[in-house]
Amino acid sequence: MFELFKNVLLGKPLKSDDGNGDSHLLNKLQGLAMLSSDALSSIAYGPEQVILVLTALSAGAIWWSLPIGIGVLILLISLTISYSQVIHAYPNGGGAYMVSTENLSPKLGLLAGGSLLIDYMLTVAVSVASGADAITSAFPGLKDVNLEISIVLVLVLMLMNLRGLHESATALFIPVYLFIGAILLLLVFGVINIMTGNLAFHATAKIGSPTSGISLFLILRAFTSGSASLTGVEAISNAVPFFKKPKTKNAVETLVIMSSILGVMFIGITFLNYWLGIIPSKNVTILAQIAQVVFGHNALGQAFFYVFQLATAMILAVAANTGFSAFPVLAYNMAKNKYMPHLYLEKGARLGYSNGIITLAVGAILLLFLFNGSTEALIPLYTIGVFIPFALAQTGMIVYWKKQSGKHYLKKAIANILGAIICYGIIAILLAFRMRDIWPFFPIITLLMFLFIAIHKHYVQVAKQLRLQEEEQEAATFTGNQVLVLLGNMTQATAQALSYANAIGTQVTALHISTKETQDKDAEIIREFQAKYPSTELVIIDSDYRDIIKPTVDYVRKCSQVAKDKHQTLTVLIPQFVPKRSWQKLLHNQMSLRLKYYLRWHEGIVISSYSYHLKD
């Protein structure tokens, strides 16, 4: 029943890829839909963040958004060149984590990887919260269930990604390409209207006009806010294995297409806002105000406007999918290096890294609960979380080119050097002026790094202890097998377990724990057992505190020592019955599971279950 439900929800399992077929992988159009939603959606709020910082001084400072926009564009070009190089150098994905690990140090790699893991969770939380805000803005009656809408959006995206790459890419086609089309239509309409004189020049101040009170600090802060639009640019470098062959070529071309669209959108929106002199409003976004003015107030213009708003709401709602694409691959690469649990190496039924997808969804939902679905508290953490790996990736690529090209590395590393300078500058600004907002990031990343190191240490120790040595120790020899059957009641399961115990054991003992509350029933069990198995030893232990587990474990420990002294094994056999239907398990106590859990920690014991399957 569960399998049927799972197949309906997620689809039938896909056959493992043999390395030749790539029908389940992404082409460039699908890759753009799947991996660009985070970066492109930032157009809905990135340019506005710059204007908000500038207008805090005065409306006349808006013209500064143009040189700041050019600065953001330069950083985008630098990051695009750098991550194109990363894709070619590390075609198995991993992005900033792999670059930092191999070229800087494993610990800096963990800093980059941990930052990105946090950032992808924040991406999902911020994106769905923004999408929920857009939905509740259109339908104010739903404002009270904003958090619940955010959680539903996370679960929908999780299920969509669990269904596989093709299904999630197909589902994202409409919101991503509708948004791209809507923004480009807005820009084309705006430029045509400006050229034809239909959009008058209403800038709050001309370019170069002196602005009282303007400072380098304010400009840098505005630049930092605008640079938040570049989050998600690295996602394609993390997800190279998702592309059809030739993987690196398709991934690089998709990255260039995405960055070109993002750059045109960012500088275009920034220019239209300057030209129209639009000032931030509490109730209407700058993007919506630009669309209202450009499309006009006639019937056709209003139709375009509502389609534009729908496209914006949709892209914000699905922007989280970039995290769902990149997080599992990053977790896979870290697990491969033994810094995360090996369960992240496993592919699910639909050839996706299901455990990574589920972990990301759970983490995002927890963030939404902690911050009550508010984006304001999440965005600063989101920014520092992405620029640390950006900076480390640039630095790592500089070292990479130095290794590859020797003295002539500067020519190839120029984009990385420029990108590193800008990224470290942004981090410095955040540390200097936004520490009050970003401080939670540091204890979280410190805790994560300690966790990664502890996991790695565990795997190394396990491998060392399990590895066969050249001079192998002599294998242990046993003279017999003592079997201890745990007797809870006289049933078919018990009878067959005792029969099996006599077949495998040189000495068989039954153990029954008696309590004051079950004295009458216990006496009946003892009489029945002794009548049927007179030659089998029965040990009865009275428990004054109604506890079955502790007396059992204590007796097993004693038996284990006795068996060890005789050079024998001890097998603890636990009889259990299995209902015909899985849901019926919930109707019975789980004593066998509890016993196995507590016994498993004791050395030198073989724990075995004898299952009796019920027919009805």
Image (cartoon, grey):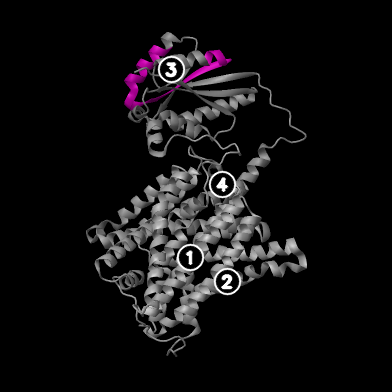
Where residue 358 appears, x then y in whole percent? 44, 46
Q: Residue at the spot x=55%, y=13% of the render?
A: 503
Which residue is at the front of the view, 569 or 332? 332
Q: Residues within 10 Å of mark 3 (few under 14, many from 20)?
A: many
Residue corresponding to mark 3: 494
* Most common SS among magenta residues: helix
Quarter of the image with the N terminus is top left
**Residue 504 part of the magenta-drawn span:** yes
Q: Are marks 3 and 4 in contact (CB under 8 Å)?
A: no
Q: Residue at the spot x=58%, y=51% of the render?
A: 454
Residue corresponding to mark 4: 244
Specify the quadrant of the image occupied by residue 159.
top left
Residue corresponding to mark 2: 424
Structural distance between the alpha carbons of marks 4 and 1 = 23 Å
Where residue 380 appears, x then y in whole percent? 44, 67
Kind of residue at badge 3: Thr
**The furthest residue to the front:** 196
Specify the quadrant of the image occupied by residue 52.
bottom left
Q: Residues within 10 Å of mark 2 (few under 14, many from 20)?
A: some
Give the foreground label among 3 and 4.
4
Above or below residue 429? Residue 358 is above
Structural distance between the alpha carbons of marks 2 and 1 = 22 Å
Specify the quadrant of the image occupied by residue 513.
top left
Q: Which residues are magenta?
A: 501-529
Left or right of 535? Residue 411 is right
Q: Residues within 10 Å of mark 1 (few under 14, many from 20)?
A: many
Residue corresponding to mark 1: 262
Mark 4 or 1, nearer chain start: 4
Secondary structure beneath label 1: helix
Give the foreground label among 4 and 2.
4
